[in-house]
Image (tube, coloured by chain):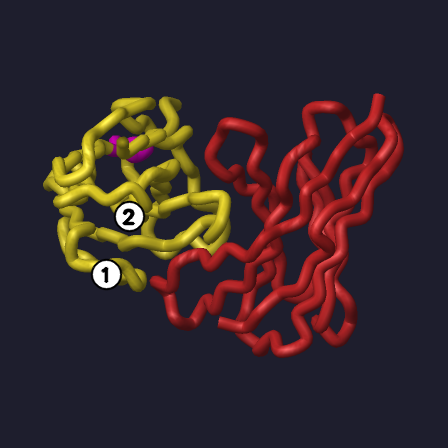
Chain colours: A red, B yellow
Amino acid sequence: DAKTTQPNSMESNEEEPVHLPCNHSTISGTDYIHWYRQLPSQGPEYVIHGLTSNVNNRMASLAIAEDRKSSTLILHRATLRDAAVYYCILRDFNSGNTPLVFGKGTRLSVIA
Amino acid sequence: KAGVTQTPRYLIKTRGQQVTLSCSPISGHRSVSWYQQTPGQGLQFLFEYFSETQRNKGNFPGRFSGRQFSNSRSEMNVSTLELGDSALYLCASSSVLQVGGYTFGSGTRLTVV
């Protein structure tokens, strides 16, 4: 699987937007970009995924660079509940059954 | 709908013993994956089952095994426990050919003493 690079940690003020970056310079044309987050004492939680176009859902937005070598997860208004480890994961749709490969992720702290 | 249920939530075992963990996926999900999470190694893939067949396997010793039943419920077993097996064991389920989300359970915290 292609690798991703994320900052180890980030900090945000409550109710401010948060932009979590992810670099994936070796991404292939069939790799989907997935984001998961893991809240304290819980299993990972699916956030969003995309292929080429920007994506929005009720949790977040995903902005994908035109060359697809990087992407940004955007939380529009951070809350204390958004404090978690955020994982950016590539998954080749053509391979069908490949498991999720988690890196170290970005630990997001939200300050009240 | 009910989420992924893992039992038990907490478990303490002695070195050399064996342990069985259980996972009930979301109704209708036929794929079940298992992960081990430790502070040092992070989240590591153990194996995945689909329709009672192991479809993928991670890089773990043969002491780690699993199975899936006809109702899609899955169990994983660790034999001859070692101290290093202390970890959070997570189960995730997904529907057929689902590109997007896996749904994870809250995990079983195993402590080996």
Query: Label 2, label 1: how many angstroms apart (C-alpha)?
Result: 9 Å
- Segment tinted magenta in the rendering: B23-27
- Looking at the rendered structure, the secondary structure element under dot 2 is strand
Mark 2: give few (<14), some (14-19) or many (20+) Cα within 10 Å.
many
The disc label shown at residue B55, or none: 1
Q: Position of residue B86 (x, y in %)?
A: 33, 38
Is residue B29 shown above or below A100? above
Residue sitting nearer the eye, B10 or B6: B10
Query: Is residue B6 left or right of B19 when viewed as pictured?
Result: right
**Chain at tag 2:** B
Main secondary structure found in the magenta portion: loop
Q: Position of residue B8 (x, y in %)?
A: 26, 23
Q: Amino acid at mark 2?
A: Ser
Instruction: Tell me if label 2 and label 1 are in contact, CB under 8 Å.
Output: yes
**Residue at (60% x, 50% y) in the render:** A87
The residue where tag 2 is placed is B31
**Residue at (50% x, 64% y) in the render:** A91
- Looking at the rendered structure, the secondary structure element under dot 1 is strand
**Residue at (62% x, 78% y) in the render:** A26
Count how many numbered circles sit on residues in the image.
Answer: 2
Q: Quadrant of the C terminus of chain A?
A: top right
The disc label shown at residue B20, or none: none
Q: Amino acid at mark 1?
A: Arg
Q: Is residue B98 magenta?
A: no
Q: Position of residue A52 (x, y in %)?
A: 67, 66
